[in-house]
Amino acid sequence: MRCPETGFPCSCEVECEQQRKKREREDYMNEVERAAANFKPGLYRHYKGGLYTALFLVTHHETRLPMVLYISHTYGGANVRPLIGWQDDQDGWLDIITIPNEGAAGGESKCHRFALVGSLPSNKTIENRAKLMAGQSL
């Protein structure tokens, strides 16, 4: 029997499926690492217009994946959202959305879910308050 992916002899389809899933998981984790390295705390505008302050990354206690801790200036309160899903997500949620183009040519254009508006002020009070909200010691 030959492997459908490589064309080489294969002992069983289960091994091929396990290898495929392992590669997919490794690719996903590499993408998570890249997203974490590129994350910038700051003020973000949602594509629908709301403002959010993304404070920093926290870790989900079960999946161990990074989450963005943010404050909504529209609705109030602190929330978390998966990092893969914050700006350039591929988690099955809305990724790069298509919006109607209001120009003379019409059509559609794409934009990210959240766009960075500006960086956070380097204010220890804000950082300490965010750490307390996340349950971290000062």
Image (spheres, helix red, strand yellow):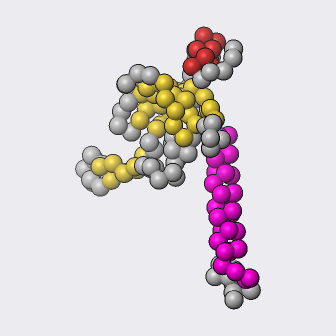
Which residue is painted at 64% across and 71% down in the image? 17
The foreground one among 57 and 134 is 134
Q: Please identify the quarter of the rendering in which residue 134 is found.
A: top right
Q: Residue furthest top?
A: 125
Asked if the magenta segment contains residue 32, the reply would be yes
Q: Is residue 84 left or right of residue 12?
A: left
The quarter of the rendered structure image containing the C terminus is top right
Q: Position of residue 29 (x, y in %)?
A: 67, 51
Tell me which segment is drawn in magenta.
Answer: 10-38
Which residue is painted at 51% across and 44% down in the image? 85
Q: Is residue 103 left or right of residue 51?
A: left
The foreground one among 105 and 29 is 29
Which residue is painted at 61% across and 37% down in the image? 60
The quarter of the rendered structure image containing the N terminus is bottom right
Q: Can the viewer see residue 38 in this picture?
A: no
Q: Main secondary structure of the magenta part?
A: helix
Q: Position of residue 22 (x, y in %)?
A: 69, 62
Count the numbered circles shown.
Answer: 0
The correct choice, above or below, for 33 with respect to 16 in the image is above
Which residue is painted at 66% across and 79% down in the image? 13
Q: Can the viewer see residue 6 in this picture?
A: yes
Q: Position of residue 68 (x, y in %)?
A: 56, 34
The foreground one among 8 and 98 is 8
Q: Position of residue 24 (x, y in %)?
A: 64, 61
Q: Please identify the quarter of the rendering in which residue 45 is found.
A: top left
Q: Residue furthest bottom?
A: 1
The foreground one among 40 and 74 is 74
